[in-house]
Amino acid sequence: MPKLHAEALVFALAWAALAIFGYVRAGYVAGALLSVGVLIAIMPASSAVLSKTGSFTLERQVRWGILLVAAAAFAAWLLLQSSSSS
């Protein structure tokens, strides 16, 4: 049985939680964008970092950074939606 990496598991759970939260708060399109859209951003960025540097630490930082930017952008969008509907 392969070793389970806690950081990868936490990242996957955080990503899934963000997509589910997007679906619950803003509907199917938001959930899909937060799951597939983040995937489309993370995969090439991770590949580029690993192929150019070979640094798993830098790749991890890039992955988490992209996820945090997506979460911040979604939070800002939610704030704009709630302020415009008030």
Image (spheres, grey):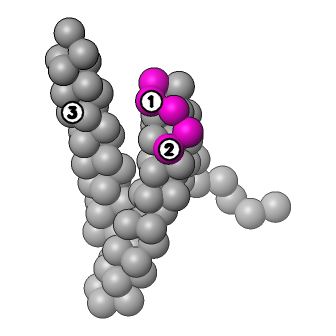
* Residue that carries the numbered disc 1 in the rendered image: 26
User: Rounded to the nearest whole Å, what is the CA distance between mark 2 and mark 3?
Assistant: 16 Å
In contact (CB < 8 Å): disc 2 and disc 1: yes
The residue that appears at 25% across and 48% down in the rendered structure is 69
The residue that appears at 30% across and 90% down in the rendered structure is 52
In the rendered image, residue 19, in percent from the top left (x then y), is placed at 51, 40
Q: Residues within 10 Å of mark 1 (few under 14, many from 20)?
A: some
In the rendered image, residue 33, in percent from the top left (x then y), is placed at 46, 51
* Residue that carries the numbered disc 3 in the rendered image: 76
Numbered range of the magenta stretch? 25-29
Q: Give residue 29's mark.
A: 2
The one nearer the camera, 48 or 41, is: 41
Judged from this view, the residue extending furthest toward the front is: 85
Q: Is residue 4 above or below residue 73?
A: below
In contact (CB < 8 Å): disc 1 and disc 3: no
Instruction: Tell me the quarter of the image containing the N terminus.
Output: bottom right
Q: Give residue 70's mark.
A: none
Q: Secondary structure at mark 2?
A: helix
User: Rounded to the nearest whole Å, what is the CA distance between mark 2 and mark 1?
Assistant: 8 Å
Judged from this view, the residue extending furthest toward the right is: 1
The one nearer the camera, 75 or 28, is: 28
**Kind of residue indicated by mark 2:** Val
Q: Which of the 4 quarters of the picture holds residue 82?
A: top left
